Image (spheres, rainbow, N blue to C red):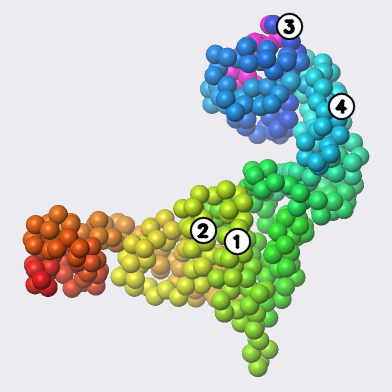
């Protein structure tokens, strides 16, 4: 018997007290069997969508909602309640052409993707397992319901979900399932970027992302042609012992758990394939690869509908991942002033990850990154100025002192440089005196 919360029981009772069937289903049941907690609750019922909207109106369901049910938050959990249904044919390899509401959970289970996600549970009726999902959970196997080739061809996003679950759960692939997935890899380009976005995010951020990507490189290679070009690409440089693809996924694994950061790691060296040159000793060099990589990554940030500010943030990380930095306080004050402290911390994290994924020749660079972080920590802890807003003087003070309006901005930046370079203390009277001396 699975443990359920008071809130879950209350939601189930709202349906059953009105004479409807209701079952917990999907990831919640899978995780509960493994004694894992989850706050995302999926329930299926034979109540039709209009009835669901009426029954759960007081929970203020999302206006976006679901096509076949309702979605709302209650307590600490997010509930999705959908009507049992059959789905017929997928002409566009994504959406069913026909949907029929039904009263049979077995038929509802047949439309689901994997056996481990097709378990139904009600606290008074027990567990319903039509396709051996519980055994697959215990054996940690990902298996498609029905014929793998047919089911994965129906909806190409199921292939992405297959790899996402591998990245998150580290289950083994059923041989027939992975064979069908590889046969259909060339259909992944049909998936709209915004349909791909959530699954890709969870894949890239999964705890088993690195091992999954290493063992199955053509998944990412099929999604991104530029990533495919990196697979088995010999970098032919003593600073690199890994091929370009393995280096990139190793860097990605060490970056913050957001889609933007993970894409930075994945794409930061894609431009190397375009710019490689060889010297007389047979050593490869990659001048300009950061610019080429940022150019490659930029359209993907657009397709995934990052904001203008986010695109600038992440492409600048790619552009500057090879930036030569000296461990000088003033240099980091200016870098923070230009890009912001969060970006500078992210750059240091990226540089550290990049160098950790190189040969031992780059070990000194890893140590330098620790020094860089300590410098930034000092700037933050001591409140050292990084922008003109941090000065003990402002534009009004300069105007009152007789500085012409069109000169105020330039004068403030000159004062900031003087403070950063240690030529003057960041004190109002001293800054005013310096400014007046230059009038």
Q: Which residue is tagged 4?
A: 130
Q: Nearer the viewer, mark 4 or mark 3?
A: 3
Q: Secondary structure at mark 2?
A: helix
Q: CA distance from mark 1 to mark 3?
A: 53 Å
Q: CA distance from mark 2 to mark 1?
A: 9 Å
* 201 over 239 or under it: above or below: above
In this view, the residue in front, 392 or 136, is 392
Q: Which residue is tagged 1?
A: 297
Disc with the residue nearer the chain's start (1 vs 3):
3
Q: Which residue is tagged 2?
A: 314
Q: Are marks 4 and 3 in contact (CB under 8 Å)?
A: no
Q: CA distance from mark 4 to mark 3?
A: 24 Å
Give coordinates of residue 431: x percent, y percent: 13, 65
Q: Are marks 4 and 1 in contact (CB under 8 Å)?
A: no
Q: Quadrant of residue 81?
A: top right
Label 1: how many Cα within 10 Å (few below 14, some 14–19, many 20+): many
Residue pictured at 57% horizontal, 25% vertical: 63
Disc with the residue nearer the chain's start (4 vs 2):
4
Q: Which residue is tagged 3?
A: 19
Q: Nearer the viewer, mark 1 or mark 3?
A: 1
Residue 164 relative to residue 373: left or right:
right
In this view, the residue in front, 142 or 259, is 259
The answer to whether any part of residue 344 appears in the image is yes
Quarter of the image for the N terminus: give it. top right
Q: Are marks 2 and 1 in contact (CB under 8 Å)?
A: yes
* 317 over 42 or under it: above or below: below
Q: CA distance from mark 4 to mark 1?
A: 44 Å
């Amino acid at each position: 018997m699975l443990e359920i919360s008071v809130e879950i029981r209350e939601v189930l009772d709202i349906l059953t007290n009105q004479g409807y069937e209701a079952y917990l289903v999907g990831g919640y049941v899978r995780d509960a069997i493994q004694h894992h907690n989850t706050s995302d609750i999926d329930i299926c019922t034979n109540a039709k969508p209009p009835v669901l909207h009426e029954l759960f109106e007081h929970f203020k369901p999302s206006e976006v909602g679901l096509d076949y049910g309702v979605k709302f938050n209650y307590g600490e959990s997010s509930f999705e309640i959908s009507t049992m249904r059959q789905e017929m044919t997928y002409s566009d390899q994504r959406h069913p052409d026909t949907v029929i509401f039904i009263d049979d959970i077995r038929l509802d289970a047949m439309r689901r993707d994997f056996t481990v996600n097709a378990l139904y549970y009600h606290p008074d009726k027990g567990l319903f397992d039509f396709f051996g999902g519980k055994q697959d959970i215990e054996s940690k196997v990902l298996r498609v319901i029905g014929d793998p080739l047919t089911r994965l061809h129906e909806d190409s996003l199921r292939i992405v979900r297959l790899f996402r679950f591998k990245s998150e759960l580290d289950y083994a692939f059923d041989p027939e399932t992975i064979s069908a997935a590889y046969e259909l890899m060339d259909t992944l380009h049909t998936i709209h970027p915004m349909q791909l976005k959530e699954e890709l995010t969870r894949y890239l951020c999964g705890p088993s992302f690195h091992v999954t990507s290493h063992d199955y490189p053509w998944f990412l290679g099929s999604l991104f042609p530029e990533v495919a070009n990196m697979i088995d690409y010999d970098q032919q440089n003593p600073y690199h012992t890994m091929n370009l693809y393995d280096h990139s996924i190793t860097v990605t694994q060490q970056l913050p758990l957001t889609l933007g950061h993970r894409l930075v790691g994945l794409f930061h060296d894609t431009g190397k394939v375009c710019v490689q040159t060889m010297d007389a000793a047979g050593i490869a060099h990659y001048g300009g690869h950061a610019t080429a990589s940022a150019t490659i990554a930029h359209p993907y940030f657009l397709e995934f509908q990052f904001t203008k500010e986010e695109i600038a943030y992440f492409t600048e990380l790619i552009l500057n991942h090879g930036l030569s930095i000296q461990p000088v306080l003033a240099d980091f004050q200016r870098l923070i002033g230009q890009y912001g402290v969060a970006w500078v911390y992210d750059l240091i994290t990226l540089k550290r990850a990049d160098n950790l994924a190189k040969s031992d020749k780059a070990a000194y660079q890893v140590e330098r990154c620790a020094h860089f972080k300590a410098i930034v920590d000092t700037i933050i802890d001591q409140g050292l100025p990084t922008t003109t807003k941090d000065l003990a003087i402002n534009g009004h003070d300069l105007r009152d002192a007789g500085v012409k309006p069109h000169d105020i901005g330039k004068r403030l930046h000159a004062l900031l440089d003087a403070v950063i370079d240690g030529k003057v203390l960041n004190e109002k009277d001293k800054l005013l005196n310096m400014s007046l001396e230059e009038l």
